[in-house]
Image (tube, rainbow, N blue to C red):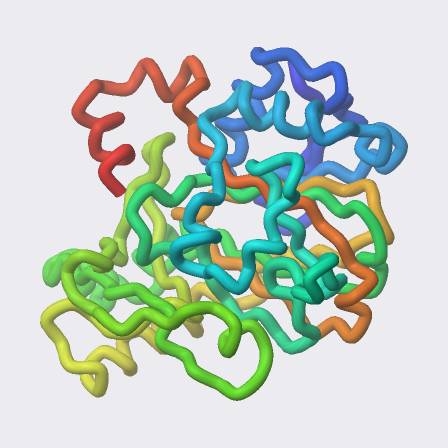
Amino acid sequence: MVNYHIHENGWTIILDDFDFRNATKEDADEISYLISKHTMVVATNSDVINAMTVEEEKQFCEYIGKLDMLDYMKKVRPLYRSAVDQENKHIARVTGEKSKNGMPGLFGVAEVLDWHNNRPQDKGKKTVVYLRTIKGALGSRTSWTNNVLAWKTLQEEDLDFANYLKENKFKIVCGQSHKTNSGYHNIINTQEIFDESTARDIIFTNESNQTSLFVPKLQAHHILGLSVEDSIPIINKLFDYCTQERFVYHHHWADSGEIILSCQWSGMHRREQFDGIENRLLHRICFDYTNTTWFNKLPQETKDYFASL
C-alpha cells in the first residue's frame, strides 16, 4: 500500500517517502490511479529520487504504460532533437542548457511557459507527464490546475453556463498558433491547419471516469463551428474560471530530487519565468495507462477510444 496525504488545497496527492527505486508494479498501479483521479501526484523525498538511475525512472513509468518514443521530436520539432537524451530515447531534457550542437532542451527559455497540455493537437499523445528535477530548479515555480474540481464547481455556481457547454457539445480546436520573435514559440514549428482533426471535447471524461474541462490555453485556437471572434469570450471565461487559486497547486521546486506526475486531460500547467533556466534540468517522460490492471479492466471500446486520441 502506498502511503500519501492530501495537500492543504484538498486535492493534490503528496506521496510520503515513497521509494521509486524499489517500487513494485502494484505500487505503480495505485499511483497511476491516483494521478487519473486527483489529476496529479507529488513526491519530494530527495535522497531516494536523487539516487535514481534513468533505467529506474523508465522502469517505474513502464509499469504504468507505454512510453513515448519521442519520434515527434524529429518530425514536428526538428530543431529540438537535442532535447532528447541521446542514450535514452524516452527521456526529454527540459532545460536551457545547451547540447554539444548548441541547442537548448525543451522549453529552454526564461520566459513564462503559459498554461498548456501535452500536445493536444497531435494524435498518439500520452496521458501522463512525469517530471523529475535533476539540478538547478531552486527558485522556479510550476503550477497545475484541477479541471475536474473546476467542472464540478462550475455546475454548482453557474449552472446556466455549464448547461450551455453541455448542450452545445463544444470542441476546442488545438494547435500551436503563436508566432513570436523570441523564446520557444520561435523554435518549434507552428500549427497552420485548425480543423476538426485537432478538435477535442471541452467537457472531457478521462480514463478513470473523472469529468473535467479541457482548455489548454497556449494551444487553444477556436471552438469548432464558431469563428475565432465568437470563440474567444467562451474560451477566456473557461480559462479564467479554471485558473482561480482554489483550483491551482503551485509547486516551488527544490534544487533537485522531486517528481511530479500529472494527468494531461484533467488540468493545465504553467511554468513561471525563470532566469536560471540554463542551470535547471528536468527529465520528462510521457506515457499512458495501458500497462495498469485498472485500465485493462475497462471495456474494449473505451480502451479503443483513448487509443484513438
Above or below, 78 relative to 4: below
Residue 209 in the image: state x and y as whole percent: 33, 33
Quarter of the image with the N terminus is top right
Question: Residue at the location (35% across, 76% down)?
Answer: 177
Residue 105 in the image: state x and y as whole percent: 65, 59
Question: Residue at the location (54% across, 23% down)?
Answer: 62
Question: Residue at the location (28% across, 81% down)?
Answer: 232
Above or below, 85 relative to 62: below
Foreground of the two, 289 or 85? 85
Question: Residue at the location (62% across, 27% down)?
Answer: 58
Above or below, 215 relative to 152: below
Quarter assignment of residue 81: bottom right
Foreground of the two, 119 or 33? 119
Residue 34 in the image: state x and y as whole percent: 53, 30
Q: Residue furthest front?
A: 101
Quarter of the image with the C terminus is top left
Above or below, 263 relative to 196: above
Q: How many marks?
A: 0
Residue 280 falls left or right of residue 239: right
Foreground of the two, 181 or 46? 181
Residue 136 visible, this angle: yes
Residue 129 in the image: state x and y as whole percent: 54, 43
Residue 163 visible, this angle: no
Foreground of the two, 272 or 67? 67
